[in-house]
Image: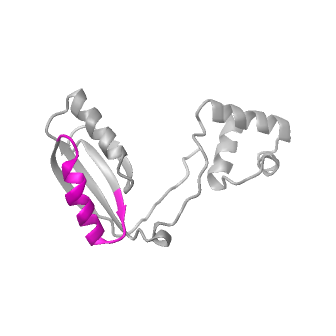
Amino acid sequence: MDALDRKILTELQQDGRLTVTDLAARVRLSVSPCHRRLRDLEREGAIRGYRAVVDPAAVGLTFEALVFVTLRWEDQGTVTAFEEAVTAIPHVLQAQRLFGEPDYLLRVATSDLTAYQRLYDERLVRLPGVQRLTSTLVMKHVVDDRPLPE
């Protein structure tokens, strides 16, 4: 990946709806080579996809919690079962496996505290291998969905 590829990625992170023509103009490249580089970045997995960034409040998801998960056991079967189960919960927006304690960090969005409590009681505490869940409520997003640095 060279500097031109990085410029393409930077521009697309700012505006994923750019046409190839507009993208080419922004990175100072003709359309055909820009299109070829774009296809290569997609094929190589540097660009994983395109999506709209939706404001959670606009769709009624105004309550957010960070959930720290500690597993009882960390054998492969438990880890696999936990990860498959957490992947199936749509309100889990992000799930990250961590080194040390806790084992996982989940970012969860719901409509309100009552909906979060229901999700917690009906789904999160029943995830395979869970020993302990600790929730922290998000007060405010200071940095959110920032493009990757060059």
Whether 131 is among the magenta residues is no
As drawn, 98 above or below 124: above
Q: Say whether residue 147 is left or right of residue 105.
A: right
Q: Quadrant of residue 108?
A: bottom left
The answer to whether any part of residue 93 appears in the image is yes
Q: Residue at x 69, y 43 (%)?
A: 7
Number of disc labels:
0
Q: What colouring does the structure picture have?
A: one colour
Q: Residue at x 38, y 69 (%)?
A: 140
Q: Position of residue 75 (x, y in %)?
A: 20, 28
Q: 49 or 36, which lies in front?
A: 49
Whether 111 is among the magenta residues is yes
In the image, farthest residue toward the top = 76
The answer to whether any part of residue 98 appears in the image is no
Q: Position of residue 14 (x, y in %)?
A: 64, 55
Q: Say whether residue 100 is left or right of residue 64.
A: left
Is the C terminus in the top left, top right, bottom left or bottom right quadrant? top right
Q: Residue at x 41, y 68 (%)?
A: 61
As drawn, 124 above or below 79: below
Is the N terminus in the top left, top right, bottom left or bottom right quadrant? top right
Magenta region, residue range = 108-129
Q: Quadrant of residue 78?
A: top left
Q: Position of residue 104 (x, y in %)?
A: 27, 44
As drawn, 129 above or below 57: above
Q: Residue at x 55, y 51 (%)?
A: 147
